Image: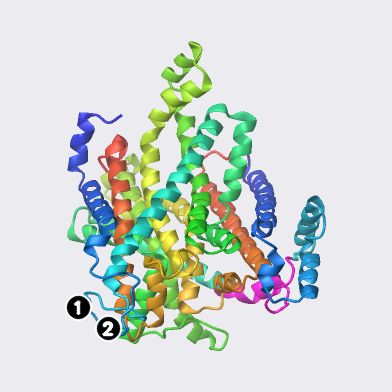
Amino acid sequence: MGLSTYVVKRILLGAITVFGVLTILFFSIRMIPGDPAVIALGDMANPEDIARLHKEWGLDLPLHEQYIRFMSNVLLHGDFGRSITNDQPTMLRIMSRLPYTLTLAVLGTGLAILIGVVAGTIAAIKRNSVIDYLIMVFIILGFSVPVFYLGILFIQFFSIYLKWFPVLGPGPNYPFWENMRRFILPSLAVAIGIGAVTARMTRASILEVLHQDYIMVARAKGAPSSRVIFYHALKNALIPVVTIVGLNFGALLGGTVLIEYVFGIPGLGTLLVEAVFQRDYPQIQASVFVFSILFISVNILVDVLYHYLDPRIRLE
Amino acid sequence: MIKREHLEILMESKLLITGLAILVSLILIAIFAGYIAPYDPIAQDFRPKQPPSSEHLLGTDELGRDVFSRLIYGSRITLYVSFLSIGVATLFGLPMGLIAGYYGGAVDKAISFIIDILLSFPAIILTILITAMLGPNLTNAMLSISVAFTPRIARIVRGQVLSVKEEDYVVASKAMGGKGWYIMLRHILPNSIAPLLVQVTLALGSAVIIESSLAFLGLSAQPPTPSWGDMINRGRRYIYTAPWMLTAPGIMITIAVLGFNLLGDGLRDVLDPRLRRV
């Protein structure tokens, strides 16, 4: 199977998955115990508002008609309905918040790869040394600290104690470079967990690659140690690293929700959390949908990248 | 199956012993919380936000409750949620994976489709969705974690079954007329259990993180129940004036997750001979 056929196939499979995701979201509002409109608007809501919501959510129609309406609204018009709290289209609110989340996710992924590859390579080269053990401790702790607590620890240490960074993350009222500065702590907090996983993978992968024949050949031919590591070993060792970063992107995306909340960043995550607090069900559905679309797209991207990097792997 | 040789490696694995020691201590703390905690975890004192002292080892919170006592009782919620939710996830995920892997074909396609859809939500986002819809409380938080982990466990089991299915002893049993469920329980399950055990242990750690994250967002156990995530959430509001409120629960969550991760990694070293020398 050629790469382009594979890409098309993956996108088609992704589209089927999106159908499944939408079905789950469709049933999510019907999962709410009691009348969702009453719960969303509160006990004191007037009957007209409740009737309006019933109509808007289609709760007055038979179930299969509701399903078809929901699907066609979303797929044909990108319409997840209006937010209950401020009556704006849910997708419009998401679009204004998305740049913060995307920036956080991209910076977080970049930092995670940087931290992971550098730490993992050093640990592998200096195997069984003090540095290796320290990196191993970092890896084990990085796995175990919950991301929201790590964010708070960073605020306590870097913002309150050292006063290097502001307590709050980026927002719409700051100029570009100020926002970039405010992205540093949150991105670092998002990155540490995946950085630790990446470091462990890089270390194991380099140690394995160093025993391969082509490394022996390179060494035997008298290539300098640094060239062997950086050119021959690292290049091949990075293939599993791509997979591990891809596999953990979901966790990173989940981490952005909590980190946005901790740093008060007006991204998609805080929008979701606010919507949860306000029982703004259409907004919850739309936000969760965008998160899973991001997740599905990155998974496809990683698979394609993986096959591109390692032609030995068969496309299935 | 566990043999004597395994027990020897077991004792040699420092990771495993450390992880086990952490978890056993936590379990003991949870069981004997009533004897260890000096105060009632929900009793309020009229002097809020006292710094740590000999009277209140870790200080008091914004309502004057003893942080140390709340910390001790909080271990109950953490362990209860993680064991119960991952237990339920295993209860459903294990047969799903077994059936999908063993029978293949349309059954496998159907189960794998459900697994893939549930896995296209990051775990924390799926749990936020479910608790938000069903209502924020401890039971729904546990339920949401079970739903998030069932497909993860099913997928691991399925992969394991696929690799064991073609072994000679399975083929032989089939040739002798062994029934599907008999082969699954007698041959496939015991030979798939090792990697599953590792993954379930690691999942327990993830469940601790997710539950504390949900509690941090106010979506798990409701006040005045002492839970570590909720303690951090409250402490965060007094980060300048009473930082002791959140430091201890933050460290405890990390230690609990560390315990499960070390145990899981240790088990992997012991059970997977291929990795032993790395």
Q: Which of A223/A99 is in front?
A: A99
In reply to whether residue B211 is colored magenta, the answer given is no
Any part of residue B144 in sight: yes
* Labels 1, 2: front one: 1
| Residue A280: numbered disc | none
Which amino acid, mark 1?
A: Glu
Q: CA distance from mark 1 to mark 2?
A: 10 Å
Mark 1 touching mark 2, by CB under 8 A? yes
Image quarter of the C terminus of chain A: top right
Quarter of the figure with residue A185:
bottom left
| Residue B55: numbered disc | 1
Give the class, few, some or many, for how many residues have Cα within 10 Å of label 1's Cα (few <14, many ≥20).
few
Magenta-tinted stretch? A80-100
* Subunit that carries the residue with mark 1: B
| Residue B50: numbered disc | 2
Rendered view: A82 above or below B93: below
Q: Residue at x 22, y 63 (%)?
A: B36
- Residue A266 image position (x, y, % from top left): 56, 78
Q: Which of A310/A194 is in front?
A: A194
